[in-house]
Image (cartoon, grey):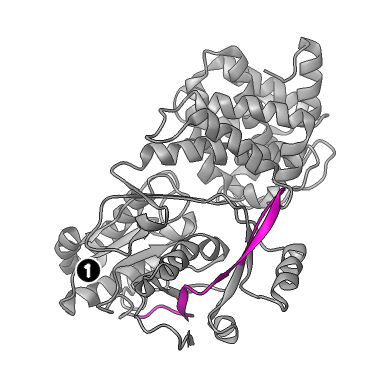
């Protein structure tokens, strides 16, 4: 099924795979700004590889939807018309439109079909496409098929830009694509090397799932329900590596930063914003909070979180044009935004993918700083307790993680012993290196795990602060 708008008189130059809420509140808004500035070719053809399929909804709304940007000082509603076309399935000729210049994608980390923590294909995750590459179901398989069709059509190269919140996302995409193509379409390998680029990008905007309240707020402002409408925070950033196969739409004219090296910007975001979100996800749920805004606004956790984000900032080299201290302060304000109800259990999903760069690598930088070490020991202890599936009161916690079965094995094997529990979790690959070997860090994690059997992280922070006569645990 496909839906097409009759209004645009230009073929879209952007193809996006995975037009979920984040895309509709982020890349699609940048495209809309370009169109409004006189570049109608900056429209998007979107492909839904997996449910929910959106073409019927897109057609029913004549290709329009709204983004509600909300903060304490007010809210603004934007009508977005940059999704020119929505398809509910990919096709082998999806990259054969001569007008196409840029392919973007939001697949989630699982969509790259890689072994977690590596850039290698996971044969189990992509076994069907390896066996029958002409009938793909994964994004990797579809891209390989479509690139081969583009090559055979004699069309020029193309830029494939991952927009997922994954470290070095372009490098990951390139690695899995190269491996998949080498094993299924070796005749495509040389052409892809010479004609296709995979820039790294960093994208940032907090976009929670649209709950009943947000949906009602959008409908009230629009005057009717908007099934594609999204609520988000006003802050937005997109940094793209200058590694392009050819011309692309004028992203720089609407605020996209195109730079030689995205890594410092990516690390800043992953450590400060995403690190704070991951820390709050586990500490917050165990402390009885439902959303990041509730947890970040709590007086006890707010002081602790402030200490944490500035400790994270100490591990970074400041990217060009940025101010780490200002970014840390802005992050705290963003997390406190009461209109952005980002559920902590949603943030806690797939945490084994996220913990390494967001928390573990920074923790290693502070192993010889006793006060900072306690910050990270509490985060790891709370992460472990969270992933046992129970809080201190025995209430169940839903675990949605690729390692959920392994977590359950470790928990059962520890039989309530905090040392065995800590050692079991720290033996996971994501902790390989100095953190696992540091006996002082292990001792602090064990101590905090023991405390979390009977009290919440918030209570532990408050009690420790009172004992020390300080404002925060560290």
Q: Is residue 119 above or below residue 83?
A: above
**Residue 51 percent across, percent down from the top left:** 56, 74
- Of residues 455 and 65, the one nearer the viewer is 65
Magenta segment includes 76? yes
Q: Is residue 128 visible?
A: no
Q: Mostly what secondary structure, the magenta segment? A: strand
Whether residue 259 sits left or right of residue 386 in the image: it is left
- Of residues 205 and 177, the one nearer the viewer is 205
In the image, the segment drawn in magenta is 67-91
**Residue 117 percent across, percent down from the top left:** 43, 43
Would you call the spot at circle 1 few (<14 residues within 10 Å), some (14-19), or many (20 or more)?
A: some
Q: Is residue 259 visible?
A: yes
Whether residue 413 sits left or right of residue 20 in the image: it is right
Q: Residue at x 53, y 35 (%)?
A: 327
Instruction: Provide the secondary structure element on which disc 1 rests.
Output: loop
**Residue 266 percent across, percent down from the top left:** 43, 41
**Residue 215 percent across, percent down from the top left:** 72, 68
- Of residues 380 and 57, the one nearer the viewer is 57
Magenta segment includes 85? yes
* Residue 394 location, quadrant: top right
Whether residue 392 sits left or right of residue 111 in the image: it is right
Q: Is residue 347 above or below residue 301?
A: below
Q: On the rendered image, what quadrant is the C terminus found in?
A: top right
Q: Residue at x 61, y 40 (%)?
A: 278
Q: Residue at x 58, y 14 (%)?
A: 440
Report the residue marked by disc 1: 185
Q: Residue furthest top?
A: 468
Whether residue 49 sits left or right of residue 161 in the image: it is right
- Of residues 169 and 286, the one nearer the viewer is 169
* Residue 247 location, quadrant: bottom left
């Amino acid at each position: 099924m496909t839906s097409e708008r009759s209004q645009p008189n230009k073929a879209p130059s952007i193809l996006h795979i995975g037009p979920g809420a984040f895309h509709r509140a982020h890349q699609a808004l940048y495209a809309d700004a370009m169109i409004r500035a006189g570049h109608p070719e900056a429209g998007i053809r979107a492909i839904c590889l997996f449910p929910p399929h959106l073409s019927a909804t897109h057609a029913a709304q004549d290709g329009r939807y709204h983004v509600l940007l909300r903060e304490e000082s007010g809210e603004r509603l934007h009508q977005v018309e940059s999704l020119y076309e929505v398809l509910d399935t990919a096709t082998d000729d999806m990259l054969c439109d001569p007008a196409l210049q840029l392919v973007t994608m939001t697949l989630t980390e699982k969509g790259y079909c890689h072994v977690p923590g590596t850039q290698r294909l996971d044969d189990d995750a992509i076994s069907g496409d390896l066996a029958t590459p002409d009938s793909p179901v994964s994004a990797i398989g579809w891209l390989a098929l479509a690139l081969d069709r583009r090559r055979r059509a004699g069309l020029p190269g193309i830029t494939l830009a991952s927009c997922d919140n994954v470290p070095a996302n372009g490098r990951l995409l390139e690695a899995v694509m190269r491996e998949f193509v080498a094993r299924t379409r070796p005749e495509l390998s040389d052409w892809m090397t010479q004609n296709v680029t995979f820039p790294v990008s960093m994208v940032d905007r907090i976009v929670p799932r649209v709950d009943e309240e947000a949906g009602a707020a959008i409908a009230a402002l629009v005057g009717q329900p908007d099934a594609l409408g999204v609520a988000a925070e006003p802050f937005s950033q997109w940094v793209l590596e200058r590694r392009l196969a050819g011309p692309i739409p004028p992203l720089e004219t609407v605020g996209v930063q195109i730079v030689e090296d995205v890594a410092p910007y990516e690390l800043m975001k992953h450590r400060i914003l995403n690190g704070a979100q991951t820390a709050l996800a586990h500490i917050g749920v165990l402390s009885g909070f439902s959303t990041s805004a509730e947890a970040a606004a709590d007086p006890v956790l707010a002081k602790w979180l402030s200490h944490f984000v500035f400790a994270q900032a100490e591990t970074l080299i400041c990217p060009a044009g940025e101010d780490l201290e200002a970014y840390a302060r802005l992050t705290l304000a963003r997390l406190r935004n009461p209109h952005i109800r980002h559920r902590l259990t949603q943030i806690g999903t797939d945490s084994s993918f996220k913990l390494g760069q967001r928390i573990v690598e920074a923790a290693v930088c502070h192993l010889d700083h006793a006060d900072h070490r306690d910050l990270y020991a509490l985060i790891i202890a709370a992460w472990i307790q969270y992933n046992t599936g129970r809080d201190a009161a025995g209430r169940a916690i839903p675990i949605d993680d690729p390692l959920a079965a392994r977590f359950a094995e470790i928990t059962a094997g520890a039989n309530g012993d905090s040392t065995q529990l800590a050692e079991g979790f720290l033996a996971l690959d994501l902790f390989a290196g100095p953190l696992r070997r540091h006996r002082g860090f292990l001792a602090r994690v064990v101590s905090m795990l023991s405390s979390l059997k009977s009290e919440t992280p918030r209570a532990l922070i408050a009690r420790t602060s009172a004992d020390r006569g300080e404002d925060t645990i560290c």
